[in-house]
Image: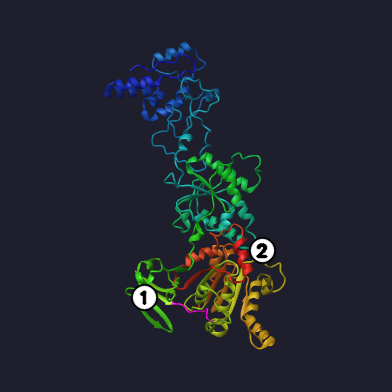
Amino acid sequence: MPLPKAPTTRGERLDIKAASRNKAKLPASRRKKSATAQAEANPALELALDPVATPVAEAVSPAVATASQGRDAGKERAAGKTGGCTQTSAPVSSPAASATGAAQPAAGTRPGVEGRPAQGSTQTAALLSAPPAGSTPDAASGTTRPDATVAPFAPARHARRHRAPGTEAATHKLFVLDTNVLMHDPTALFRFQEHDVFLPMITLEELDDHKRGMSEVSRHARQVSRSLDELLAGIEGSIEQGIPLDRLGHSDATGRLFLQTRVLEAPLPEALPPGKADNRILSVTAALRQVFPERQAVLVSKDINIRIKARSLGLPAEDYFNDQVTDDLDLLYSGSLALPADFWQTHGKDMESWQDGGMTYYRIRGPLVSSMLLNQFVYLEDDGGTPLFAQVREREGDQAVLRVVRDYTQARHAIWGITARNREQNFALNLLLDPDIDFVTLLGQVGTGKTLLALTAGLAQTLDQKRFTEIIMTRATVPVGDDIGYLPGTEEEKMQPWMGALEDNLEVLNRGSAGGEWGRAAAADLIRSRIRVKSMSFMRGRTFNNKYLIIDEAQNLTPKQMKTLATRAGPGTKVVCLGNIAQIDTPYLTEASSGLTYVVERFKGWKHGGHLTLQRGERSRLADFAADVL
């Protein structure tokens, strides 16, 4: 087989494609023999004749064609006729490499053939060890003379195409976490399932800055630091390969954790100062997307502004959604269900009814049963018949047991002089006074009577029924939120400015006390003797037995704070959470990520828990109108 025609012009490429076509015309036995003999004589041709290595050969051929630029064209033509390119004493190199002396073979390559990995060699691309994208441009194509400053073909460029350790599919993303995500949820590292997590160095610095103090944010920062320390414990060698996130028992976290171990920067607009922490995180995210485009680096932050800046720079950014139980608040569980007008026709065919303890029960069967939850209220207001107001007490298969609720709208069922003014308030009092319900959540706009109903039911069960020993009331101290130590006095005196709602409702309850002014004063003293105001800052580690715990303004609590308070309940304790998710004051907290929304969805359907959303305001006509139009 004739060798490819030698270039007639300095810098022209070898006609390797013509040689390959000639080879294809030969018989198989002769083609194999010819290829073997010529490959031994010229390693560059071995690459050209190998279909798999053709792209590599095209990258190497410009360097081969110009390796002997110091020699005259006649010698080059003679070399082409005698069966090989002119070889130097060193392996084939680019002009840039020739200018500085003989180039050394790259690690894992066959001597004499630059850029071709040796057989059996393994190249694993660590997440932070590949060169930046675009640092090794493609080899010149056509007959264009290669520039002397173009770097030779590098194996690392091909290695960058391999997936980083810990990823089995190209869809595995790399989530870059902002500091506020970890301070919002200290377990956020383990909430990304099969995807990988990347922590910039500035994130670690900010965690260190916030670890001092007794606030919830400081505790979360310390918890994250401990988790990182446990993950790194026992790791031998470099951590650039990533740290398995399931080392601490989080079986759902099958990805890896990567820490920034070297400089990663991408240019940002001049309007974004490089010294600001948010901008440094943006720069790292942009650099990761440039270096590893196949990894789909995504910034995760609770800060709306940094997400806006990221998107303006063309970077994908997301909120932290793991603790959000619903995307549409209109679908949030309300605790009540309106029955259709034909309910009795479709569900009353095999109905059973009985009475027990003065309460009426119905056992029904029908298609709506599957959509009912335990302790959910159902109602049917038929103008032509008797209305039905009941609570789901049992549900199994296609049948459910409904219990008719007690009517607290009537004066004879008044609690401390308070009667329900609407359907939802009546349902709420049934929940609050039920001894089988341990956890109650009440949502509603301003003026719906949440605090008054909870306090009334608590006093009735503490002073009259002796079910609880005392009432404990607490709330999130927002905007201070973290520390009340700057206020003078005892714990209750420090909390007093935040308990205006308690004082207002106690005044309403004490207004109807008999015995004139002296009687009201005595009743006020009795009430205050059974109410304890506690700060959330001192709740951790406590256990409340036989207490009636009211958590006011619960919409300002994070899911982790809500868990801390709910787990304080001991035997015989009832927990009541009140709030309006439209009035959230805590930074980085939204209606979907509020702790109150979180527990509403988590506790729905539990046989010892109940929820109700109050719809209608009863404070005053002015308050109702302002709530609607403002």
Gap in angstroms between the C-alphas marked 1 and 2: 51 Å
Quick one: quadrant of the N terminus?
top left
The image shows residue 82 at horizontal and vertical percentages of 39, 14
Asked whether 114 or 339 is in front, the reply is 339
Q: Which mark is residue 363?
A: 1
Q: Which residue is mark 2?
A: 480
Please, what is the three-letter code of the amino acid marked with disc 1? Arg
Question: Quadrant of the rendered structure where residue 383 is?
Answer: bottom left
Residue 90, numbered label: none
Residue 292 position, x and y percent, is 50, 41
Please name the residue shown 56% across and 57% down the image: 224
Q: Secondary structure at mark 2?
A: loop
Q: In this orientation, which residue lies closer to the viewer: 621 or 117?
A: 621
In the depicted structure, whether residue 381 falls above or below residue 312? below
Q: Residues within 10 Å of mark 1 (few under 14, many from 20)?
A: some
Give the extent of the magenta segment.
404-410
